């Protein structure tokens, strides 16, 4: 991944990569982070460091415990290049994960934000003021939705866009498809002089129904996971007890070690896994 470029400074090299790696730049924008060039510079440094560390470590290994031969050095170069590439793509994957996580958080609390917007629309609150109010209520409707609203305001205040143009630009880089859908509709209705109140009311009903279905699916999955968990734990406990009894009767064991192992390790570990699964599928998280 990291190829030496003769007489080209590292900064120019990272700028060259930053221009061409549009996928990372797109994910970075959806995370609402600043200074993509700096992030790319750090990523390249990490990749170079991984290359050097693996190459030096491999060279020391060859010098001390193996033979320094062309084929071995070629293998070490390939291994170092692979470590460099893995480091680069690990950083890129972290961006995609952050983007997906932000999108999930926005989706989870979007229906509540729409309800708040509907209330403001019924009171004839200006559209710009709506997003300003949402940007100040991150603790209520989620910090990620507040950040999206803040981004729209920054496009108006700093870039000089009108509110409709700012909404259209913000939706194109949003990590949430549902938030994009909402913003597209708001821009179209507001720009065409339609009823924002009617649009938000329809969206609120639609997202409320979607949330209701998500919660129903979650409750059904919880019941299924609970039944499977209880069955597995019950069967495992009986199985461990039988093994412990057989070992005791055979004289291979003189205590209840397996029973204690089940109580101290198996059950807590299984409970932890199940709790994580439940939390991951919770539509409110």
Image (tube, helix red, strand yellow):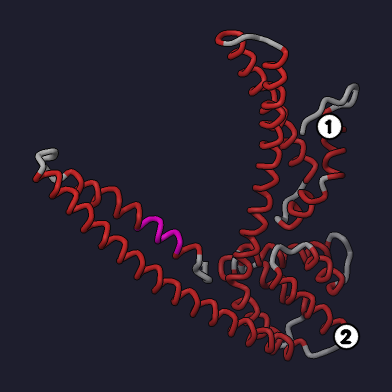
Residue 49 seen anywhere in this rendered image of the structure: no
Query: Quick one: label 2, few (<14), some, or many (20+) residues within 10 Å?
Result: few
Provide residue 20's location: percent of width, then percent of height.
Answer: 86, 44
Residue where numbered disc 2 is placed:
192
Provide residue 130's location: percent of width, then percent of height.
Answer: 72, 76
Residue at figure coordinates x 72%, y 56% from the top left: 32
Report helix, strand or loop for mark 2. helix
Tell whether position 226 is magenta.
no
Q: Is residue 95 above or below residue 231?
A: above
Q: Is residue 185 above or below residue 254?
A: below
Of residues 101 and 188, the one drawn nearer to the viewer in this rendering: 101
Q: Which of the two labelled residues, at mark 2 and mark 1, occupies the earlier sequence position? A: 1
What type of secondary structure mainly makes up the magenta span? helix
Which segment is the magenta one? 271-277
Using residue 137 as the reference point, say whether residue 1 is left or right of it. Answer: right
Using residue 238 as the reference point, say whether residue 111 is left or right of it. Answer: right
Q: CA distance from mark 2 to mark 1?
A: 47 Å
**Res 83 quadrant in image:** top right
**Res 233 quadrant in image:** bottom left
Q: Is residue 210 above or below residue 170?
A: below
How many numbered marks does the figure carry?
2
Residue 86 seen anywhere in this rendered image of the structure: yes
Of residues 236 and 185, the one drawn nearer to the viewer in this rendering: 236
């Amino acid at each position: 991944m990291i190829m030496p470029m003769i007489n080209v400074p590292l900064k120019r090299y990272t700028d060259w990569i930053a221009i061409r790696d549009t996928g990372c730049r797109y994910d970075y924008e959806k995370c609402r982070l600043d200074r993509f060039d700096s992030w790319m510079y750090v990523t390249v440094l990490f990749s170079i460091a991984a290359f050097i560390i693996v190459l030096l470590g491999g060279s020391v290994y060859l010098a001390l415990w193996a033979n320094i031969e062309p084929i071995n050095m070629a293998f070490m170069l390939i291994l170092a290049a692979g470590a460099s590439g893995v480091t680069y793509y690990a950083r890129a994957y972290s961006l995609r994960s952050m983007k997906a996580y932000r999108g999930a958080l926005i989706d989870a609390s979007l229906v509540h934000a729409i309800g708040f917007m509907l209330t403001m629309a019924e009171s004839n609150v200006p559209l710009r003021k709506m997003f300003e109010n949402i940007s100040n209520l991150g603790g209520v409707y989620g910090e990620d939705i507040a950040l999206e609203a803040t981004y729209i305001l920054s496009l108006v205040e700093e870039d000089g866009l009108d509110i409709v143009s700012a909404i259209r630009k913000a939706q194109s880089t949003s990590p949430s498809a549902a938030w994009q859908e909402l913003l597209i509709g708001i821009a179209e209705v507001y720009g065409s002089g339609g009823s924002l109140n009617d649009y938000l009311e329809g969206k609120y009903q639609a997202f409320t129904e979607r949330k209701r279905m998500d919660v129903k699916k979650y409750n059904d999955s919880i019941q299924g996971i609970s039944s499977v968990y209880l069955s597995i734990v019950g069967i495992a406990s009986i199985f461990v007890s039988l093994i412990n009894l057989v070992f005791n009767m055979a004289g291979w064991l003189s205590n209840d070690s397996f029973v204690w192992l089940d109580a101290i390790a198996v059950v807590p570990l299984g409970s932890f896994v199940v709790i994580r699964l439940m939390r991951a599928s919770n539509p409110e998280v």
